[in-house]
Amino acid sequence: MESKPLVVVGAGVAGTAAAIEAAKAGVQTTLIDENPIGMSMIGLDVPQFFGQRIMGTLRNKAVMLGRVAAANDALADAEEAGVDVQLGTYVWGAFRNTETSRVLDGPQLGLADDEQSWVINYDRLIVAAGSRDLGMSFAGWNMAGVMGANGAYSLMSRYQALTSQRMVVMGSGNLALNTARMAQDRGVEVAAVVDVSPSVRGGEALVTGLQAKGAKFYTSHTVKEAVGRADDIEAVVLVEIDDDAEPVAGSEKTIDADTVCLAIGLAPNVELLDLLDCRLAFKSELGGYVPCRDDRMRTSVDDVFVAGDAAGFHDEMILNPEIARNQGRLAGIAAAQSLGAIDNAEALARRSDILRSAAVTAPPAEVHTGWKKWLRSLVNAGGLDIFACLCEEVTRAELIGLQPPRYLEWESERMSSRSLQTLMKDGPVNPDQVKRLTRAGMGHCQGRRCREQVSLILAEEAGADIAEVPLTSYRPPVRPLPLKVMWPHEEPEQVRRDWVKWFTP
């Protein structure tokens, strides 16, 4: 088993900055990033919500490696600083000794590529795993053409492989406006920017630039449905809403478009941190559950640090990437100091230089009030018989009613009488219990598209504060992997010849 002094997970702005800072301090550093992602995973909308608007060139791994490297100048800087950069490598698990596990030879990460999986040890870990798109369902969101802002960003920037022609963007914060601007810069017509708020929430300069290129803004509106043929979006129906998020009769507008981009918000990727028992706390202004950390980016687990969106995302970070870069640099310095590569005085001097040059930003605002209004508007416009969980095809009504999967054909009178209200008699609402009963969140995307929406629905139905709904638990592998990767051996000839018999009644 390999052993690494420092591993950085994620080669975005924060991760590359952390790796470079640590390497310059003399630490042998390994930087791991899952991009380019295999076509099979992208087709499953993992790890981002890609929406099937992808070019066939993604099948060429060599081409994609070149594009990923070209899109991120900091990767070349990292290699020049001596960082061991490993692209196309997935981190599917994180393990350390706890009260119930004392046999590991130090903390470990489970890694994989398209051919094999393996485990490495590390002395220090920096998690810069980024964030994922907030999913909000509406009629037709299961069709090709619905994607998230992060998925769109990857296809436009890293992969240069977005096939969209005309886009409707949901949201009007800096995340949405910047995504719309990127789309316009790459020849995609932005037909509409939609928000439930009565006014646009993002920067005025972005709004002006988008309007100059033909984008129309629809405030106090929501999406009623996406329509099309052969499971492919052709148009989006918008509807105006009143102050109570109720649709205004006769206000529907049909917008021709082949893509809907969900850019309402992002949620920090905390799976690895949760597996390592890092303490997490709910902070709405940072996107939900985030790791508790000090001003040096150290988590509650001494050898684990965090930076970038994984430490908490807010809208200002879209326009000011220096926020994530500075967090990465601070984490890199702290990791180097903890390994004895630099002394306390030098670490203090380096931190002071970073903090002295950092721009002053306004405190971020909480986001869940806006998220709840979006959900309420979509429910009012589209009803409860809309899939909240696409992978397992669980509707909002089935989620609230705790209905078992349809394919089980459950006829138990006792189970049929269960609902969220009866479950609450046993204690506070818990997404894990709901997941076991309905399978919501247990599909191939592992809840990446539905976790936040499920929690919001549960909180709304239970009359609870969203902060009272616990984080859904995680187990490795925290991303789907092909069986050939988990077990890279050929099956015996008898198994290959007779396997169908196992399923014969």
Image: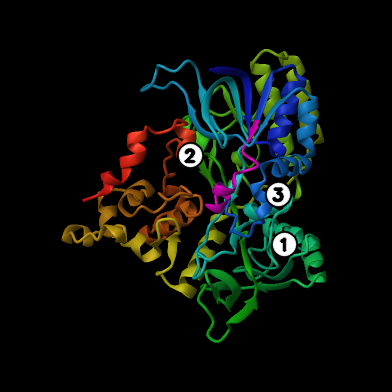
Write the residue at 64% across / 15% down: 339
How far across and how far down the image is residue 32, in percent? Answer: 64, 31
Q: Which residues are magenta?
A: 32-46
Closer to the chain start, of discs 1 and 3, is: 3
Q: Nearer the viewer, residue 277 or 150?
A: 150
Write the residue at 40% across / 56% down: 392
Closer to the chain start, of discs 2 and 1, is: 1
> Dot 1, crowdedness within 10 Å: few (<14), some or many (≥20)?
many
2 vs 1, front mark: 2
317 to 304, vertically: above or below: below
Q: Which residue is mark 1?
A: 180
Look at label 1 and name its amino acid.
Answer: Ala
Write the residue at 75% across / 58% down: 182
Label placed on residue 478:
2
> Dot 3, crowdedness within 10 Å: few (<14), some or many (≥20)?
many
Is 42 included in the stretch rendered in magenta? yes
Look at label 3 and name its amino acid.
Answer: Tyr
Q: Which residue is mark 3?
A: 159
Residue 225 visible within the image: no
Secondary structure, mark 3, is loop
Estimate the spatial distance between the alpha carbons at disc 1 and disc 3, rounded to whole Å.
17 Å
Look at label 2 and name its amino acid.
Answer: Val
Write the residue at 66% across / 25% down: 30
Secondary structure, mark 1, is helix
